[in-house]
Every structure is written in C-alpha cells, then in structure tokens.
Amino acid sequence: MNAAQRYRMRTPSTGREIIREAEPGRIYVDRETGEPLDIVGKVLPLAPSTSRLPWAVENLRFCSWCDQLAQRDLNDCPHCGRRMAPIA
C-alpha cells in the first residue's frame, strides 16, 4: 500500500507538468528552469491506496460484481472486496 500522496505540479513560465510524491512544507523546483513548482492538484486515488495508476479512462475498468469503477492494476475491487474477472 502506498502511503505518500502524489500531486500534479506545474512550472509557471513554461506550463510543463509533472506528477510526483510530495511532502508538506517542502519546496520543489523545476530541474530545467530552476523555478519553484506550483501545486495544481492531488492525483486520484488519494493516499493510502493499493493502486499506483492515476484515475483516467484508460486506467479504469468495471468490477464484474458491483459494476463500480476500479483501477486496472488491482485484483480485488476496492468497493465490494471481491476478486474481479481477468482483463480481456
């Protein structure tokens, strides 16, 4: 299980974005420009989570038991706890 929260961060001048784990109170800088990165938002799923995939259409599938969305890298549904069918 992953306990660290991942954030989407952006360089103000270039608009370049990265996703990385961050600690509160620490300043992160862009390696190319040296500017401080702005935090744009938290990446779902929120920590702690068993999945490392961000919530996006291409990373989700429906549970074969409860029809709720779950990440593709999980074997057990986070909603009903049952084992999901294999990915076709």
Image (cartoon, rainbow, N blue to C red):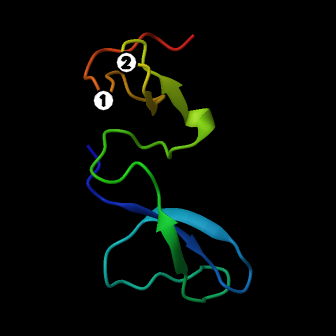
Picture quadrant of residue 77: top left
Q: Which mark is residue 79?
A: 1
Q: Which three-letter amino acid code belongs to the residue tagged 2?
A: Cys
Give the percent coordinates (x, y) of residue 10: 61, 75
Q: Residue at x 31, y 22 (%)?
A: 76
Give the percent coordinates (x, y) of residue 18: 58, 65
Q: Which three-letter amino acid code belongs to the residue tagged 1?
A: His
Picture quadrant of residue 85: top left
Q: Which mark is residue 66?
A: 2
Q: Nearer the viewer, residue 42 or 24?
A: 42
Task: Point out the residue furthest to the right here.
Answer: 14
Q: Earlier in the sequence, mark 2 or mark 1?
A: 2
Q: Secondary structure at mark 2?
A: loop
Does 59 appear above or below 62?
below
Does 75 appear above or below 15?
above
* Left or right of 87, for residue 4: left
